[in-house]
Image: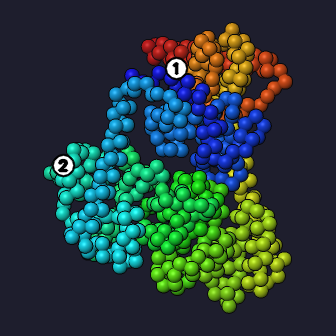
Amino acid sequence: MPLPQSFLDELIFRSDIVEIVSRYVSLKRSGSGYVGLCPFHNEKTPSFHVSADKQFYHCFGCGEGGNVISFIMKEENLPFVEAVRFLADLAGMTMPEEDGGADKARQHRDRLLHLNREAARFYHEQLMSEEGRGALQYLLDRGLSRKTITSFGLGYAHPDWDRLTKAMLEKGYTKYELEDAWLAKKNRSGGLYDAFRDRVMFPIIDIRGNVIAFGGRITHGDGPKYLNSGDTPVFSKSRNLFAMNFAKKTKGKRLILAEGYMDVIALHQAGFDCAVASLGTALTPDQCRLMGRYAEEVVISYDSDAAGQRAAQRAIDLLNSAGLQVKVLKIPGAKDPDEYIKSNGREAFALLLDNPQSDSEYRLAVIKAKYDLDVDAQKIQYLKEAAEYIATVASPVEREIVSHMVAQETGIASTVMAAEVKRAFTARSRREKKKSDAAALQPVRAVQPKEQGLRYKNPRSAVCEEKLLAIVLEDRALLERAEELLTPEDFSSDFLGNIYRKALDAARTGDVSVAALMAGLEENEARHLTGVLSGRVVSQDERRELEDYIRVIKEEKARSSMDGDRRLLEILNQKRERKG
């Protein structure tokens, strides 16, 4: 059976959303609520609001919203029941009996985590065995100590087709579990073979200490250099970072973002315990937000080749949008941190780390490398492209400083460069305003919910229904007045009518809690409802406002009914005409 609503109501009551969200987001009081940088999208100006009295959150930037349960589901990447369990543990509540499906899903996740840990132990034992001597020597030759190898739990996958599979089956794990954990794959005849073979293995560990996936590096022969686990019920590569389990404990507020496993491990071995890497994919917004939970500044230390430069530029945008200060490490005479530390030592790398480029300096250096500034035509092209970039910088002070820097290095007057930046900035602003004006000319589209699956058949009525809900959910007396004049069936939107019905039911049995109302909603519905409630404007005469909304809703219902009758008559007349 599903979790009882009474249990969920009590859990929401005990789980103060401000306290829970503050574990992940730095909140500041603003009026009756709190604001901070949204953990679900990248932003520099806080648009994430938490309502202490209504116990919900809403972001005016990306539209995310919900109650404390939906927050934990998104932030911790947990299914509903696991998020409830997470909060129940914090609140000291005992979980009621769960329905069979939810309990099975939890048990399956637990089994996969245990399986991954057993696999990591198996791979490490193989590395330390006689058969793993070549792989161990490879790691030692790369400069890793035995202590580091053990600390990171590195291992070795034997070339045999099914050595791990057989070992895990003997321990009682099933073929389905091995396949679902991305440790084994099915062949054409239905048998299983190991997903990783003849590779050095890197276990990927989440911030709670669970082994959730693996990366494998080939040391000889053919095949992709790196092979990484695909997404599984316990692993999402876009939401995790390699070595974040170590880096989250660093004393400073800075992280080093490297490109691969070996770079990160070499940095940790050299004493830089704040290094992390993405997992075989380009950096994602979710990974940036994860870094933002533990750091204020990120220093990008990618390879110096063309691919590394492209990746660094993309990372700068994502990290900046996540509200992080971004620096870029220029590594002279080496392609990556591992190579530089081996050649020059820890102290030399520490000096580099203390003098990184700003993101603007790095961007301009990349642009500058495309042109020969001794050729006038190319210098002009560089100045134009540099001005276009500087025009995207949000801070006027930073725009002026960077503009002056470019003028100095190219030998032109600062006023000339400033004028070129101003021209580019004005043109960019004009384009953005034109786009905004075009959107404003479509009022019907503007009132439609952004959420998929929520579309209003009657926008005029639905807007009034939204505003009615915003005031009756705030004032019990107004809800009672609305009940006298309006039924849920009068609503043009089934979704809004259902919220109204739930509020009436709750009022008859106790208090109306907005957070509790959200417990039974789909994610997109909760997001939209928090937007509706957050957009409420306080009126001087709310009772009169309520009655105005009710009048419009009833008018629109009557008009829709008349339109339906008229259409029915037209169809009947058409049928009579066809019959002669």
Residue 55: quarter of image: top right
- Badge 1 amino acid: Ser
Residue bearing mark 2: 170
Q: Residue at x 46, y 49 (%)?
A: 208
Please report contact status of discs 2 and 1: CB closer than 8 Å, yes or no.
no
Numbered disc in front, either 2 or 1:
2
- Residue furthest to the left in view is 189
**Measured from the top left, where is residue 107 in percent x and y?**
34, 37
Q: Residue at x 35, y 76 (%)?
A: 140
Vertical relation: 527 (above or below) 466: below
The numbered disc on residue 89 is none
Q: Quadrant of the N terminus?
A: top left
Please indicate whether residue 128 sits to the left or right of residue 106 in the image. Answer: left
Residue 421: quarter of image: bottom right
Give the distance between the C-alpha atoms of the residues marked 2 and 1, in whole angstroms: 44 Å
- Does dot 1 land on a helix, a strand or a loop? helix
Sequence-wise first label, 2 or 1: 1
Please indicate whether residue 172 sits to the left or right of residue 372 in the image. Answer: left
Q: Residue at x 58, y 24 (%)?
A: 517
- Badge 2 amino acid: Glu
Q: Residue at x 55, y 53 (%)?
A: 290
The numbered disc on residue 6 is 1
**Measured from the top left, where is residue 247 in percent x and y?**
52, 60
